[in-house]
Image: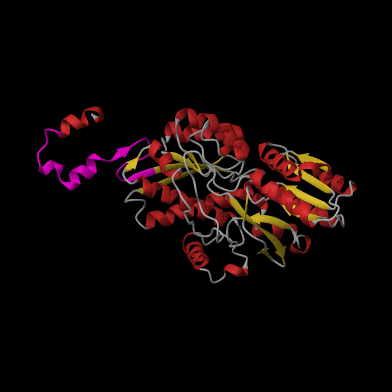
Amino acid sequence: MKSNRRAFLGGVSAAMLSAPYLARAQKKYDDGASDSEIKIGHTCPYSGPASAYGVNGKAIVAFWDMINDKGGINGRKIKFISLDDGYSPPKTVELVRQLVEQERVLCTHNTLGTACNTAIHKYMNQRKVPHLYLATGASKWGDPKHFPWSMGYQPDYHTEAVIYAKHILANVKDARIGVLMQNDDYGKDYWEGFKEGLGKDANRVVKHVTYEITEPTVDSQIIQLKAADANVFFNIATPKFAAQAMRKVADLGWKPVQYLNNVAASVGTVLKPAGFDNVQGVITAAYVMDPTDPTWANHPDMADFRAWMAKYHPTAHLADLGNVSGYTVSTLMAETLRRCGDDLTRANVMKQAASFQKFRVPMLLPGITISTSPTDYYPIQAVQLQRFKDQSWQLFGEILSAESA
């Protein structure tokens, strides 16, 4: 029928060419979209060693509840299907195949974890299903030439690590650096960026230790770093292990300058469990407003966020940064779908995702916006450093990007 559409229109009456008829005729749908509904798939570790990230998934569910209450996207309700993969790549593969082949979702959104997304990377591109705004900052997600159906969201780990390295060299006299790294693609991406940032000073790393996600603790690794007489600690760890590491640093009486990767910067799920007394002065990078930071107490974005939390996510805690992550990335996904209009094909979803120019998403730090293009799949490319003081983060310095780093 679609191939004969031009000939068919040639014989219709004037009445049939009225605006309502043309609007209906111009609608285009792929799997997962209809006049009344848009299906979106998602995987997240609600259980397992990275279950702290379940906060993100619950926030996204609550976001789409709000959107549906407001009438959906262009009159279509969102059916958001969120499944627990336990941070296990084989399970992610199984569940994503279910979402694509059985549920027939239009796209996936904010699937979480570097290893988990790596496991479905080729599959999503072979099936030509939008694999959008991933909850991982690995640099591989910005490769439209080879993987045109996959796009990241947050600042990439490589650039973030370069920024930490430059800051250490500029601010820590005679730096002797100890590095804890999760032994997977996520950890290695940070590690490679960190070494690049150190450049000719890479020999300032006096000890580099790794851990597996299946290990119960990282206590022995922290003991090794202290024994190496490091005066800087770069903590490349997911929430559970990041909190353990900082608590062990304190238990040992070790007092290095500490840098924490952004993915473990949640006050509620990392800093508080580590013990506020143990994390004073820790430095990390930020790209969103933290609800614990009094700087934003009277900001309109924060007022809207708090109102959304109170109505749609009342059991969640404001100190859990995953709520902000879920809120901001879903705002971008909603805007992408709005821009699709009635052309809800997978190709158009990707076209719109790759067409943002300095788009302001609520709760991003002032000066940080979303920009993408067919050759640029890194939506956010800037951060600002912050330091932990008392019970919240405090921003300092300028907005930094890969270029400024």
Colouring mode (rainbow / by chain / secondary structure / one colour) = secondary structure
Does residue 54 belong to the magenta stretch?
no
Residue 215 horizontal/vertical position (percent)? 75, 40
**240 left or right, relative to 322:** right
Q: Residue at x 65, y 46 (%)?
A: 159
**46 left or right, relative to 103:** right
Residue placed most toward the observer, 380 or 105: 380
313 lies above or below 245: below
Quarter of the view holding residue 388: bottom right
Total label count?
0
**77 left or right, relative to 53:** left
Residue placed most toward the observer, 12 or 89: 12
**393 left or right, relative to 97:** right
148 lies above or below 330: above
Residue furthest to the bottom in view is 298
Whether residue 12 is visible to the viewer of this picture, yes or no, is yes
24 lies above or below 70: above
Q: Residue at x 66, y 48 (%)?
A: 160
Residue 156 horizontal/vertical position (percent)? 61, 45
Residue 105 horizontal/vertical position (percent)? 42, 38
Whether residue 87 is visible to the viewer of this picture, yes or no, is no
Provide the residue span drawn in magenta.
10-38
Residue 257 horizontal/vertical position (percent)? 80, 56
Quarter of the view holding residue 183: top right
Q: Residue at x 58, y 46 (%)?
A: 46
Q: Which quadrant of the figure contains the N terminus?
A: top left
